[in-house]
Amino acid sequence: MADTVIQVENISKLYRLGAIGTGSFRQDLQHWWNLYILRKQDPFFQPGGSKSFAAERDQIWALQQINFDVKQGESIGIIGSNGSGKSTLLKIISRIVKPTTGTVKGKGKISSLLEVGTGFNQELTGRENIFISGYILGMSKAEVRSKFDEIVAFSGIEEFIDTPVKRYSSGMYVRLAFAVAAHLEPDILIVDEVLAVGDADFQKKCLGKMKEVTHADGRTILFVSHNMQAINTLCDKAIWLNKGIMKEIGPSSAVVNKYIASMQKFKLEQKWDTPSDAPGNDWVRFKQVQLIPHMQESDNILDIRTPLTIKFKFWNLHPGINLNVGLVLYSYSGDCIFDLLSPTASCHKGIVEGECTIPGNFLNDGSYYITLTVAKDASIPLFNLEECLSFDVEDYREDIHYFEKWWGAVRPKFPFRLQQKEMALE
């Protein structure tokens, strides 16, 4: 059984808004005496504590009662919306920030990449900063020198290695910072949103290196990212934080699915019982619109592989007219993805229904809405039902280690053949 290298027990972190300390010298002194001399729990920074300290509206619990263990060689992804406490948790584990309550027990050397180039001296060159970072991590000059060429080659900034880092671009900065953190052989590597800065090639190298150090070298990684595909690819387990509370911990794919499902904002169906209540006019009035994702399980996420069927019903209020329905799909940025027109149908007075299926592996990931347009003789618009359905499509990339946004409004999976015909001659 793998050893536990990080043990997080009842970690909470309270911040007070708009002030430093408790508000009085006597209480500040009491706070210091209890915390550092008597080693007691802080009476001022407890839920339901001293009312003289601050009203609840002046306090923010960035983390509340967080508990988990990390085994040696595990890669743990930490996900959640902005402000959920991810970076605060990493800073506490890295011993940059002290928790209000609870303890963190760790075993081994920790290397943290929480902000780009943290710890770099702006006046020193890239070469000098590599050696300084190594010394901070407890390595000897010989150990750093043995890894130096590999670090520089990974960063891709060989020609600028003797230039002061204050002249580096943000991309060069993050390349060198990650290269140093990943190659100086820490037992635990803590990474916060490093993939948000680099280009596609750098992201691929970063993920490849992190997979290498976990699976080949048996080192441990804590990884914060908003890129769910990267979390699924790299991490064995995931922790979902929401407003400082740990909502879920478990296998990365299961936790990511639950997180994405909670973020998706669907309007998948609308119904109207009578024509008098329904949207429309003297020509037509809609009875029902519905979007049906074809998923094996209802709690699965809607991603680019999912076929979507749009069904609709409307009351035709005029006998003997030729009707068409146009289905227009828009992205929420306002771009028209496609405008599809149904065949013409000769309709009598009564209920008319129709359906259309968007195949899987056609749409790119993103947010979309649908407008339905009823027309007479394929040329005379009768009524538009604007934004009647809306949905989100999530990303999915099996065995593809490219993590930037995929180009294009659509992302079709057409037949595409590639094979080697001849072997190279000796």
Image (cartoon, grey):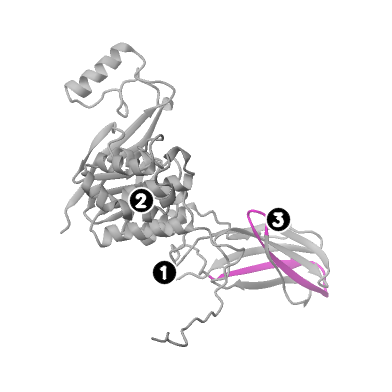
- Range shown magenta: 307-335
Q: Closer to the camera: disc 1 or disc 3?
A: 1
Image quadrant for the N terminus? Answer: bottom left
Q: Between residues 332 and 270, which one lies in front from this camera angle?
A: 332
Mark 3 or mark 2, which has the lower sequence index?
2
Q: Is residue 290 magenta?
A: no
Q: Amino acid at mark 1?
A: Asp
- Check disc 2 and give the amino acid type: Ala
The residue to which callout 1 is attached is: 399
Amino acid at dot 3: Asp
Does 323 lie within the magenta span?
Answer: yes
Q: Position of residue 259 (x, y in %)?
A: 42, 54
The residue depicted at 29 percent of the width and 16 percent of the height is: 28
Q: Is residue 258 left or right of residue 36?
A: right
Q: Read off the residue under disc 2.
A: 179
Task: Report the front residue among 383 and 39.
Answer: 39
**Image height of 279 relative to 399, above or below:** above
- Examine the rendered structure and indicate whether residue 425 appears above or below residue 59: below
First along the sequence among labels 1 and 2: 2
Q: In the rendered view, would you say 241 is above or below 292?
A: above
Left or right: 260 in relation to 236: right
Tell me what residue is drawn at x 49 percent, y 44 percent. 169
Earlier along the polypeptide chain: callout 1 or callout 3? Answer: 3
Where's the C terminus, which quadrant? Answer: bottom left
The residues bearing labels 1 and 3 have C-alpha atoms spaced at a distance of 50 Å
Examine the rendering and report whether any part of residue 134 can be seen.
Answer: yes
Give me the disc on residue 277. Answer: 3
Residue 55, by quadrant, is: top left
Q: Closer to the observer: label 3 or label 2?
A: 2
Contact check, label 3 and label 2, Cβ < 8 Å: no
